[in-house]
């Protein structure tokens, strides 16, 4: 089975009989769960401030606490939550808000696809829970763990994922609530408007690791700027697929060239 | 009320976005089961984050709402610093830190 479509975290050579590998294979599901919990903790440094910020931004856009929690519990996807709030405060029509939010989350279809070979045999109910808590960080941690230890049992894989999901998703909800309730205490003049662009750029920049990624990014940015005059969010829906197609073309072109060399 | 949208509209957006996002996440895992996807689909999907998120951010960087849509040196420099540090160090936290320091530093200096 050809496993997954990237994005691959830089992974070490899979070693099945090193001490860490043996430890991983010997874990009970409970221990695998705790291992997932432990490895997720550092990510809270990003998730908690980001979630507080979402609460603040949404509050300033005019939402009430119930709506903010609705976003963080039902949608549970930071980038699309910010996108929706941003477009709502630009008075974009509802269908543009929804389409843009979904477009931002489309990458998760890729995550879903790449987990298929690892979670074969999971029950329908387990897959529902995984889908609900499949965020960038839980995906990145788990796929890295699965590739590092390919011989884990399905129970160990599911337990590890559950560990990351609990530590990453519950604080997202709790910190959104904190932002939504104490948000007004944060002074207006500290240029918080720019926290979102900076956070997104910081998440994306490390992913620009091949000419194809750079080309995709460049075309999408260029398209978004040229199409900025279109109604809110529409430019994004044209520019992003253009960028994705560019990335795919450049990747293919690079492969053909390598094949001929 | 949020912008021009009614409370009901906001709730509809939340629920539809929630269901849609769930279905995206569940899609291949739940529905595809044991089959594989065409290579060209995977190839395009691979570039989703690096296309969507920068396209989303670019207009906010060029024409920030906080300045009434006028390009502004501190925000442009902060965005450039974030991207540069992120690409060089591959470290999200360092990139955020570089962007924040640049932004507040330049806003302070420019008064």
Image: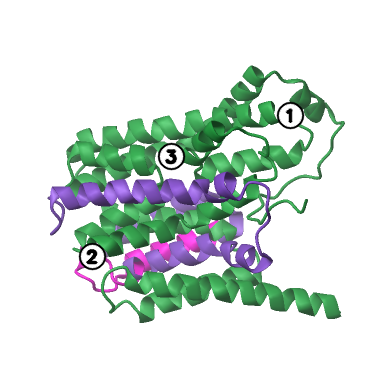
Q: Are marks 3 and 2 in contact (CB under 8 Å)?
A: no
Give me the disc on residue B65.
2
Say few, some or many: other residues with alpha carbon within 10 Å of mark 1 (under 14 / 14 to 19 / 20 or more).
Answer: some
Q: CA distance from mark 1 to mark 2?
A: 51 Å
> Which residue matches tag 1?
A153
The residue depicted at 16 percent of the width and 53 percent of the height is B2
Question: Label 3 marks which chain's residue?
Answer: A
Q: Earlier in the sequence, mark 1 or mark 3?
A: 3
Question: Label 2 marks which chain's residue?
Answer: B
Specify the quadrant that holds the C terminus of chain A: bottom right
Q: CA distance from mark 3 to mark 2?
A: 25 Å
For label 3, the SS is helix
Q: Is residue A97 above or below residue A259?
A: above
Q: Which chain is purple?
A: B
Residue B97 drawn at (x, y percent): 45, 49
For label 1, the SS is loop
The residue depicted at 39 percent of the width and 70 percent of the height is A237
Q: Are marks 1 and 3 in contact (CB under 8 Å)?
A: no
> Which residue matches tag 3?
A47
Q: CA distance from mark 1 to mark 3?
A: 29 Å
Q: Is residue A93 above or below residue A167?
A: below
Residue A240 drawn at (x, y percent): 46, 70
**In terms of image quadrants, where is residue A72?**
top left
The residue depicted at 36 percent of the width and 62 percent of the height is A100
Q: Which residues are magenta?
A: B61-86
């Amino acid at each position: 089975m050809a496993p997954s479509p990237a994005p691959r975290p830089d992974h070490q050579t899979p070693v099945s009989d090193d001490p860490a590998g043996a430890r991983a294979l010997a874990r009970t599901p409970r221990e695998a769960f705790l291992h997932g919990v432990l490895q997720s903790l550092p990510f809270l440094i990003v998730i908690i401030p980001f979630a507080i910020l979402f609460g603040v931004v949404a509050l300033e856009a005019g939402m009430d606490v119930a709506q903010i929690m609705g976003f963080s519990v039902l949608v549970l996807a930071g980038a699309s939550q910010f996108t929706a709030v941003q477009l709502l405060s630009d008075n974009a029509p509802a269908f543009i808000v929804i389409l843009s939010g979904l477009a931002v989350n489309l990458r998760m279809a890729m995550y879903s696809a790449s987990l298929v070979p690892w979670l074969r045999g999971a029950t329908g109910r387990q897959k529902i829970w995984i889908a609900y808590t499949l965020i960038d960080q839980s995906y990145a941690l788990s796929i890295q763990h699965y590739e590092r230890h390919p011989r884990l049992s399905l129970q160990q894989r599911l337990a590890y994922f559950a560990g990351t999901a609990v530590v990453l998703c519950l604080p997202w909800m709790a910190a959104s609530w904190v932002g939504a309730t104490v948000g007004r205490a944060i002074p207006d003049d500290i240029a918080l408007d720019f926290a979102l662009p900076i956070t997104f750029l910081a998440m994306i920049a490390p992913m620009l690791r091949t000419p194809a990624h750079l080309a995709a990014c460049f075309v999408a940015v260029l398209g978004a700027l040229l199409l900025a005059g279109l109604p809110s969010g529409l430019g994004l829906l044209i520019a992003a697929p253009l960028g994705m197609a560019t990335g795919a073309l450049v990747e293919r072109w690079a492969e053909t060239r390598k094949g001929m060399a | 009320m949020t912008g021009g949208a009614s409370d009901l509209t906001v709730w509809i957006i939340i629920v539809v976005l929630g269901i849609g996002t769930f279905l995206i996440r569940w899609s291949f895992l739940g529905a595809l089961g044991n089959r594989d996807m065409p290579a060209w689909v995977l190839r395009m999907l691979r570039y989703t984050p690096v296309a969507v998120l920068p396209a989303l951010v670019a207009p906010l960087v060029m024409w920030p709402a906080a300045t009434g849509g006028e390009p502004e040196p501190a925000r442009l420099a902060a965005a450039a610093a974030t991207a540069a540090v992120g690409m060089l160090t591959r470290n999200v936290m360092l990139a955020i830190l570089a962007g924040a320091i640049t932004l507040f530093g330049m806003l302070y200096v420019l008064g």
